Amino acid sequence: MGKIVISFKIFPTGLEVNLDDLKKEIEDILPSKTSIYGYQTEPVAFGLNALIAHILIPEDESGLLDKIEEDLAKIPDVSQIQTIMVRRTQ
């Protein structure tokens, strides 16, 4: 059975947000069947960096993408989320 990699661009609320702490918060809210595939940072403007989180989910789980996106939006240090890629992997 394959897996799906979803990449989310997560914008913090401000420059004072520690991205390492934000990574821990993301890992804490993920459902048990999911895992982190990796992280990247991307400069946005004036010293602000967005966090790109690559998350693996099982291919046969429906509705998990929406749940993850909703849970990410509930993190206090997150101002905006964009789903930038969804692809199948082996």
Image (cartoon, rainbow, N blue to C red):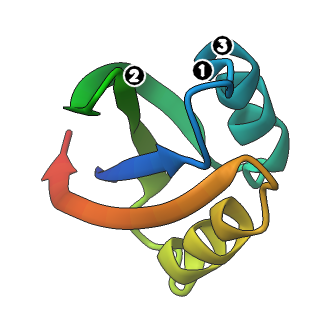
Foreground residue among 60 and 69: 69
Nearest to viewer (mark 1 / mark 2): 1
> What residue is at 81 percent from the left and 55 percent from the top?
76
Q: Residue 13: x percent and y percent? A: 61, 49
Determine which quarter of the picture holds residue 43.
top left
From mark 1 to mark 2, how far is it between C-alphas?
Answer: 10 Å
Query: Does residue 56 appear left or right of residue 44 in this picture?
Result: right
Observer-nearest of 19 and 30: 19
Q: Residues within 10 Å of mark 1 (few under 14, many from 20)?
A: some
Is residue 32 shown above or below 85? above
Image mark for residue 88: none
Q: Tag 2: residue type?
A: Tyr
- Position of 56 compared to 41: left or right? right
Residue at coordinates 44% horizontally, 64% vertically from top-left? 81
Q: Quadrant of the C terminus?
A: top left
Coordinates of residue 16 in the picture (x, y in percent): 67, 24
Q: Alpha-carbon neighbours of circle 3 within 10 Å: few (<14), some, or many (≥20)? A: few
Q: Position of residue 74 (x, y in %)?
A: 78, 67
Q: Secondary structure at mark 1?
A: helix
Task: Residue under label 1, please give it.
Answer: 19
> Which one is in front, 34 or 67?
67
Amino acid under label 1?
Leu
Asked whether the residues under the numbered discs 3 and 1 touch, taking CB atoms below 8 Å apart as contact, a structural biologist would say yes
Please give the name of the residue rendered at 39% of the width and 29% of the height, measured from the top-left corner: 48
Per the image, the residue denoted by label 2 is: 39
The residue shown at (31%, 20%) is 40
Q: CA distance from mark 2 to mark 3?
A: 10 Å
Under tag 2, what secondary structure?
A: strand
Q: Residues within 10 Å of mark 2 (few under 14, many from 20)?
A: some
Disc 3 marks which residue? 20
Cα separation, mark 3 vs mark 1, equals 4 Å
